[in-house]
Image (cartoon, grey):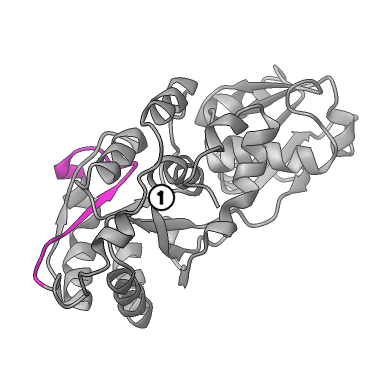
Amino acid sequence: MKRRHFLWYSFLFLSGCGTAVTNNTNNASNSSASSNAQKPLRFTVTDVQGLENLKQQYEPFRQAWSQVLQQPVEFVPVNGYTEAAAALRLDRVDIALSGPSEYVLIRTRTEATPIVAITRPNYHSAVVVPAESPIQSLDELKNKEIAMREIGSTSGHIGPTGILLEAGLDPKTDYQAKMLGDRGSLAALANREVDAWAGPWLDYQQFLQRENISADDYRMVKKGPPLPNDVFMASSFMDKNTIADIRDRTLANQQKLIDILATREKKYEQSQLVAAQDTDYDPIRNVYRAIGQGDFLNSEGQS
């Protein structure tokens, strides 16, 4: 997905949403998948703003998904993940597609249920230094300046922070992260304004191609593990039978759906649809706690 613009005031929005909705599943348990068969399934994508953009990027998928589910699917545009969280809480959206970091923040205040995840080949973070840098290992980045993308970006902030955490570096005290945007962060590395760059592995590969340089010119100190997947999440107002039916039908027709998604979203080429579990996103939560934002994860919506 396009990289998310997470600012800390967004956390305040989610915190202000109040205590997570409870007992909604129980209230809806008398509804069956068949009773909802002809009701439009209200669908949004958290990082696509405006109805026209949703149509441009996801209309073929919407049509195909409607056929697979044997149920109408309609778009509900939102202006970012904070609006998506509110829409889920207020029963204005049934299913939202989001990135992993967004999912964690939405889940804490909405009790949204992960249904199906989309794998993303080559979805990793990496740490890179110039060829002449004396830095050979991650622990040598202590007391250094590191360029990153933006606060909350899964591959441009959360993933890199996780890599550094594994190396024993405390993000609050051991180095200075400078959030410089997509190209700005790599430009800062190229201009030797920072000691290292940490961000999406694919951005690093594209940087080498764009500048017509080799990996020998900018050494990769570490490539991180695969990042958690993008995820379709269901509102807590949806009953378990309906969620299970959506999951089963979507997974059974995954090749058709992925082929259609990939025509508009190149990041989903060679992707797969897989069942999603909330625990898959615990690595994201661990990083938020490490950067001092754990209070925003303390709600009944977190398992």
Kind of residue at badge 1: Glu
Question: In which quadrant of the rendered view does residue 212 lie?
Answer: top right
Q: Is residue 228 magenta?
A: no
- Residue 80, how many percent across, how many down? 32, 35
Q: Which residue is mark 1?
A: 111
Residue at the top extreme of this rendering: 193
Q: Nearer the viewer, residue 172 or 17?
A: 17
Segment tinted magenta in the rendering: 38-53
Q: Image point 24% across, 64% down: which residue?
A: 61
Q: Image point 12% across, 66% down: which residue?
A: 72
Residue at the left extreme of this rendering: 38
Q: Look at the picture and state if 121 lies above or below 8.
A: below
- Residue 24, how many percent across, how many down? 30, 54
Q: Image point 36% across, 38% down: which residue?
A: 81
Residue at the bottom extreme of this rendering: 252
Q: Could you tell whether 73 is left or right of 122 in the image?
A: left
Q: Could you tell whether 267 is left or right of 87 in the image?
A: right
The crowd level at tag 1 (other Cα within 10 Å; few <14, some 14-19, many 20+) is: many
Total marks drawn? 1
Q: Is residue 46 magenta?
A: yes
Q: Look at the picture and state if 112 lies above or below 60.
A: above
